[in-house]
Amino acid sequence: MNALLFFAGCCVGSLLNVICYRSLRGEDFVSGRSRCDHCGKQLSFMETMPLSGWLLLRGRCRHCGKPIDIKYPLTEVFSGVVTVIIWSRGDSEAFLCWLFIMTMTLISLFDMEAMEFSTGLLFFLALVGIMISFTNDASLVSRILGSMTLSLPLLSVNRLREVIGDGDIFIFMITGWAFGCEFLFRSVLISCITGLLYSLITGKRKMPFCPFLTIGIMAALL
């Protein structure tokens, strides 16, 4: 059962990769075969299989030999692991939590690729967050504090000097309302720690925050 869930999750991750890649290039993500990022050669069915295609090709295009971006299999693996973990819980909240994380994963892909994401994705995330708020036991006070404690001060600071993207702040607001104040602070703390570690290891100073926030939210759900 877990193997099937993992494969299904990998397929969703592959779809998210396609949506992000083609949307940013103004291409139709519903139809058409995938192509190599470098040489533009059309990929076969086996080459586009989630995770196994990347392993089969040993991480390189068989036409031009150039490396396939590691973010593609990593997204598939992450989506597969998330699907197994969340759906194995078997509670009434599982589908909505899974949908929330998958939406955050897609937002993260856009954030990594272009350092921006559409308001449409944020509104969809907000809709899922509102539905989640009806399924868990977080109190109304906790939701109000969660949606305002971080977001309002950061929005005020951003008016003077931008320290974080407004989209990230809106995600704080959504997450705080959906899961409560304690959950938000736990997920943001984990996000900051993983982001700091990544910065120390890679030496990068300017990074998209959504991927780390997605990891933090997922870790807080465990």
Image (cartoon, grey):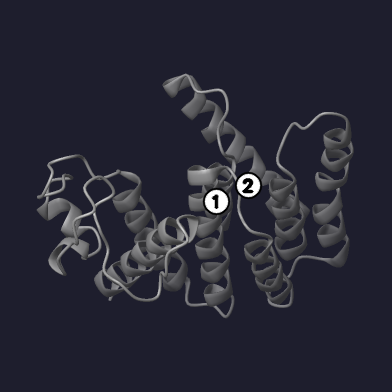
- Specify whether 99 is left or right of 20: right
User: In this orientation, which residue lies closer to the viewer: 122 or 146?
Assistant: 122
On screen, residue 28 above or below 216 = below
At x 87%, y 39%, the residue is 153
- Specify whether 45 is left or right of 145: left
Residue 146 is situated, as x and y percent measured from the top left of the image, at 80, 54
Per the image, label 2 sits on a secondary structure element best described as helix
The N terminus: image quadrant: bottom left
Which residue was labeled with disc 1?
214
Crowding at dot 2, Cα within 10 Å, few <14 / some 14-19 / many 20+, comes out as many
Number of on-image labels: 2
Q: Which residue is the extreme one toward the bottom?
A: 92
Instruction: Give the image quarter of residue 165.
Output: top right
Residue 205 is situated, as x and y percent measured from the top left of the image, at 56, 23
What is the three-letter code of the residue carrying label 2? Ser
Distance from Cα at disc 2 to Cα at disc 1: 8 Å
Crowding at dot 1, Cα within 10 Å, few <14 / some 14-19 / many 20+, comes out as many
On screen, residue 154 above or below 32 = above
Per the image, label 1 sits on a secondary structure element best described as helix
Q: Nearer the viewer, mark 2 or mark 1?
A: 1
From this viewpoint, is residue 206 visible?
yes
User: In this orientation, which residue lies closer to the viewer: 84 or 28?
Assistant: 28
Instruction: Give the image quarter of residue 209.
Output: top right
On screen, residue 181 above or below 191 = below
Which residue was labeled with disc 2?
187
Q: Which numbered circle lies on residue 191? A: none
